[in-house]
Image (tube, grey):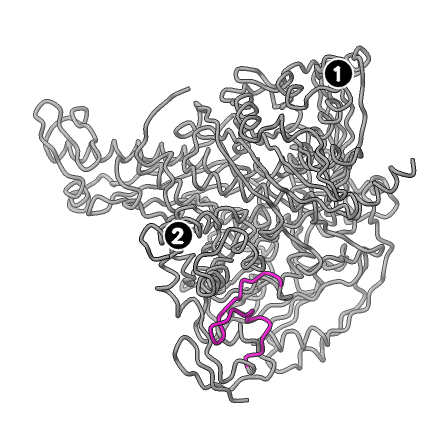
């Protein structure tokens, strides 16, 4: 079947199998940041934004994304670069395989709630698994970013 | 202890690949290898023990896009081990690429290679296999000398004498002791005896096992794999495929986590075999389910301890027997078990008069176990630390005080640790520090919070090693570039841990330059100097020292080239970072000029390679304390605070060391409270996805706080010891302790799930 889908601002028209998942469509179109960590919608690694909302691209048929606006980390480099350096300062990137999904969901969180509490951060990102960091360093990184925003009077 | 201020070492430098990873750049295997490779899929046995009578793949081969289907009849008949260990491996050669005898549910039956995943899966569903189904041996307590033999084959081969006997289902067996245990136990005021049971746990690194293979432009087998062990992998493939090592190149890209799982060549042989046969690029990516059922999880162990002590709390004798479940194949079986005693017992060197440590490692018809962070020490420390907590509670002595009394201290010789000296040991300070930071006196008492909820705390100590003494080899090559920067080539594998960065920090410290001036490359069997690999907590300690040595050699060479340029003796030159200075005249030659000189009419390479190995394996030490809230109605344990103080010598990168500790603690919490590799009564795996096999989320771990007590290890680079593995060892005994405090019942089997706690409370009430 033919679909038309907007990926990172570019409209793509493609012939796809009806059972193609969005994650595989995106990777086939060069969005390698989108990672698969499980087959059961449990890990959050494949998180992308659809019309600005975070979704699991492993759990959505590419056909369902037709006509929608998809954003992956490739398309949000600047918005991510604003805060991921603070996570790098903690060393919490570690193996990095969960990073793109976690960063995408953090972008969604900060758009929705620019000044979250620690518990709000934990709750929002609960679906993003990380086996390396123990999560605490990721939290410290986000907290350090928010503190720097406050210092700059941007929050 | 040596106090020094460093420029690059002991600094929280960002990981060299941090921004690449955080911005989602294509750096992992499936991002950087061609998409048009053959898709390789493994057909797996539905039976725990069976002989393949017949395989009919004639219909499957007709599926459009199928390139090849291989069965046991197609593969070489040389047995090999897939454990990433130095030769001769302690692990037995008990595998074939495909074996007619399948030994666990998930064992490989056929290899399918097709143009697309769909075609491969379609073909797999059309392969018809007739099995001669045999009775499996699933209970590891009954495996030794059972009439059901997991490996009856005559070509089973142990390259090392480790006490194994395939006809008895024995992978390994040994006895070790120091002093007269029975006599000392006889003389003790009290002897406690308990048995502890730890289960298999899955590493669940976020990137599953995966390998890509192709013929390179020289017609050699080029293997790109998510592996911790490029050199061992090359050796394993060479034996398994029957081709020379010169015809194989193994490299790793960035790795999405390993934790020991990728210290076993779990999946490399399959695509390599496909490429060898078809001449075409091939890629195998394990599903999460495959990683869960045919990976390399922690060895299940049952550890029986007899502990002899005096009424004043002096621990005088320890008698250990460990039974380890290696599963269907023997990878890492003979070695993991050793740590269950040798990296637990020495914690109590203080007043210990005698110990005995015996073990058996057995085959069963379950998924083969492998290497997992902690590597047997985790199991042994759960048992011993629980036992010591039981002793403290029985004697009514504060469990931190009983440890103060018995723990190993700096300067002691540790008979149970191969008689090594504790040259650098801040365990006593870790305990004191943690007690204060955690407010032990306030949190240890059981506090009723109302509504059936109680709060209390538990404690545990831990140790590990830093490398395999007399075995591991690390190497480093450092090269000067024209602009005075350096390339550092290593064979160690950064799997997310940050070893590329900490090794660059060491090089920068030695070469008196910025960490940014060191470009790191690893690991590739063609380009890297030999390194046994990143495992056994060896990289910082062993490869780090190799970096230090290589830098010393390079500095000498740089001075020598500069001396030639100035026409003076090498001894007159002093390396000063950006330039070399001639003592006396004060003349300097810049590094850039030296580098250019090295490239024109020159006979001295401005590069150096050095190797390092160690006769000792200095243990890091650690204390962990946990505060929990336990709901007596549901058995739910909520971790409130986990605090730990670690002695890893001088931390090369305090930020990365801290993350290692935090990550290890959360994995340990998972093993203790929720994770369990389970099977049904036919040996079929139950928890094969993240729906059933739950790992901690960020809502499950409470508040973490990790601090360090420094010691200075004289044999380590810049005083460093290891950090990677020890950090997983304290949660299980500390949590089991806190749970006992809360409910009055000792749980001696992991995991301690809410169900088990609730059931034990009900049983307790009945009594």
**Residue B24 lies in quadrant:** bottom left
| Residue lying at the far top of the rendered structure | B187
Chain where mark 2 sits: A
Chain where mark 1 sits: B
Crowd band around label 2 with a 10 angstrom C-alpha radius: few (<14), some (14–19), many (20+): some
Residues shaded magenta? A42-62
Regarding residue B335, the answer to whether it shows in the image is no
Residue A83 lies, with reference to residue B410, above or below; the image says below
| Residue at position x 80%, y 60% in the image | B47
Residue B517 lies, with reference to residue A12, above or below; the image says above
Q: Are marks 1 and 2 in contact (CB under 8 Å)?
A: no
Quadrant location of the N terminus of chain A?
bottom right
Whether residue B225 sits left or right of residue B579 in the image: it is right
Local secondary structure at mark 2: helix
| Residue lying at the far front of the rendered structure | B450
Residue holding disc 2: A145
Residue B499 is situated, as x and y percent measured from the top left of the image, at 44, 43
| Residue lying at the far right of the rendered structure | B766
Based on the picture, tell me whether residue A48 belongs to the magenta stretch: yes
**Residue B540 lies in quadrant:** top left
Regarding residue B766, the answer to whether it shows in the image is yes
| Residue at position x 15%, y 39% in the image | B590
Crowd band around label 1 with a 10 angstrom C-alpha radius: few (<14), some (14–19), many (20+): many
- Residue closer to the observer: B316 or B113: B316
What label sits on residue B282 in the rendered view? none
Based on the picture, tell me whether residue B497 belongs to the magenta stretch: no
Local secondary structure at mark 1: strand
Residue holding disc 1: B309
Residue B406 is situated, as x and y percent measured from the top left of the image, at 64, 17
């Amino acid at each position: 079947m033919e679909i038309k889908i907007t990926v990172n601002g570019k409209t793509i028209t493609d012939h796809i199998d009806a059972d193609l998942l969005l994650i595989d469509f995106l990777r086939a179109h060069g969005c390698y940041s989108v990672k698969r960590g499980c087959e059961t919608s449990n890990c959050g690694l494949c998180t992308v934004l659809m019309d600005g909302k975070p979704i699991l691209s492993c759990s959505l048929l590419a056909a369902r994304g037709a006509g929608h606006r998809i954003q992956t980390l490739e398309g949000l480099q600047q918005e991510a670069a604003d805060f991921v350096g603070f996570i790098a300062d903690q060393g919490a990137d570690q193996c990095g395989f969960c990073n793109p999904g976690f960063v995408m969901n953090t972008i969604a969180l900060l758009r929705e709630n620019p000044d979250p509490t620690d518990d709000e951060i934990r709750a929002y990102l609960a679906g993003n698994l990380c086996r390396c960091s123990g999560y605490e360093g990721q939290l410290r990184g986000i907290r350090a970013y928010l503190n720097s925003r406050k210092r700059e009077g941007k929050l | 202890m040596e106090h020094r201020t460093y420029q690059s070492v002991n600094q929280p430098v960002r990981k060299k690949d941090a921004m690449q990873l955080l911005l989602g750049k294509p750096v992992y295997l499936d991002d950087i290898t061609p998409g048009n490779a053959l898709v390789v899929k493994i057909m797996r046995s539905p039976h725990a023990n069976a002989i393949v009578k017949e395989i009919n793949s004639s219909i499957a081969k007709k599926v459009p896009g199928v390139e090849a289907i291989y069965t046991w009849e197609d593969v070489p008949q040389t047995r090999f081990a897939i454990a990433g260990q130095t030769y001769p491996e302690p692990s037995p050669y008990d595998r074939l690429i495909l074996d007619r005898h399948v030994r666990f549910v998930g064992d490989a039956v056929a290899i399918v290679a097709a143009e697309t995943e769909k075609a491969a899966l379609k073909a797999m569903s059309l392969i018809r296999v007739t099995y001669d189904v045999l009775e499996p041996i699933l209970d590891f307590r009954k495996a030794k000398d059972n009439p059901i033999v997991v490996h009856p084959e005559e070509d089973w081969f142990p390259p090392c004498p480790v006490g194994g006997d395939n006809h008895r289902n024995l992978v390994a067996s040994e006895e070790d002791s120091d002093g007269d245990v029975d006599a000392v136990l006889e003389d003790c005021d009290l002897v406690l005896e308990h048995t502890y049971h730890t289960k298999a746990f899955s590493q669940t690194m976020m990137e599953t096992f995966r390998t890509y293979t192709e013929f390179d432009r020289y017609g050699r087998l080029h293997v790109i794999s998510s592996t911790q062990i490029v050199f061992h992998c090359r050796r394993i493939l060479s034996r398994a495929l029957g081709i020379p090592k010169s015809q194989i190149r193994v490299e790793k890209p960035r790795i999405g986590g390993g934790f020991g799982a990728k210290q076993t060549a779990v999946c490399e042989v399959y695509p390599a075999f496909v490429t060898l046969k078809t001449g075409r690029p091939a890629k195998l990516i394990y599903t999460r389910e495959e990683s869960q059922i045919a990976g390399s999880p922690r060895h299940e162990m049952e550890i029986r301890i007899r502990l002899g002590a005096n009424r004043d709390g002096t621990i005088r004798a320890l008698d250990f027997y460990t039974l380890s479940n290696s599963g269907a194949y023997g990878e890492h079986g003979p070695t993991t078990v050793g740590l269950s005693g040798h990296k637990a017992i020495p914690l109590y060197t203080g007043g210990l008069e005698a110990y005995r440590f015996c073990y058996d490692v057995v085959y069963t018809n379950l998924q083969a176990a492998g290497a997992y962070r902690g590597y047997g020490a985790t199991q042994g420390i759960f048992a011993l630390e629980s036992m010591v907590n039981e002793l403290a509670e029985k004697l009514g002595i504060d469990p931190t005080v009983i440890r103060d009394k018995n723990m190993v201290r700096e300067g002691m010789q540790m008979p149970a640790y191969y008689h090594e000296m504790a040259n650098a040991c801040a365990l006593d300070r870790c305990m004191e520090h943690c007690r204060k930071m955690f407010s032990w006196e306030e949190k240890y008492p059981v506090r009723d919070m109302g509504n059936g909820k109680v709060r209390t705390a538990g404690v545990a100590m831990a140790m590990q090693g830093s490398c395999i003494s007399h075995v591991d080899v690390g190497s480093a090559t450092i090269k000067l570039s024209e602009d005075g920067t350096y390339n550092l080539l290593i064979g160690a594998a950064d799997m997310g841990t940050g070893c590329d960065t900490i090794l660059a920090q060491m090089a920068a410290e030695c070469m008196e330059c910025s960490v940014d001036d060191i470009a790191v490359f690893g690991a590739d069997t063609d380009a890297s100097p030999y390194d046994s690999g990143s495992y056994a907590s060896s990289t910082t300690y062993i490869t780090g020292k190799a970096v230090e040595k290589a830098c010393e050699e390079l500095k000498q060479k740089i001075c020598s080239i500069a001396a030639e340029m100035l026409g003076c003796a090498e001894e007159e030159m002093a390396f000063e970072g950006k330039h070399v200075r001639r003592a006396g005249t004060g003349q300097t030659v810049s590094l850039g000029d030296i580098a250019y000189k090295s490239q024109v009419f020159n006979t001295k390479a401005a590069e150096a390679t050095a190797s390092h190995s160690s006769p000792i394996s200095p243990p890091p030490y650690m204390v962990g304390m946990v505060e929990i809230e336990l709901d007596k109605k549901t058995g739910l344990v909520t971790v409130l605070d986990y605090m730990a103080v670690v002695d890893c010598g001088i931390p090369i990168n305090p930020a990365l060391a801290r993350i290692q500790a935090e990550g290890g603690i959360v994995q340990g919490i998972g093993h203790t409270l929720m994770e369990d590799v389970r099977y049904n009564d036919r040996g079929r795996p139950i928890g094969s996805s993240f729906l059933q096999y739950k790992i901690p989320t960020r809502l499950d771990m409470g508040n973490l706080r990790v601090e360090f007590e420094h010691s200075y290890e004289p044999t380590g680079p810049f005083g460093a010891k290891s950090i990677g593995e020890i950090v997983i060892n304290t949660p299980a005994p500390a949590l089991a302790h806190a749970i006992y405090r809360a409910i009055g019942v000792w749980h001696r089997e992991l995991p301690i799930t809410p169900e088990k706690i609730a059931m034990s409370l009900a049983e307790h009430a009945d009594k």
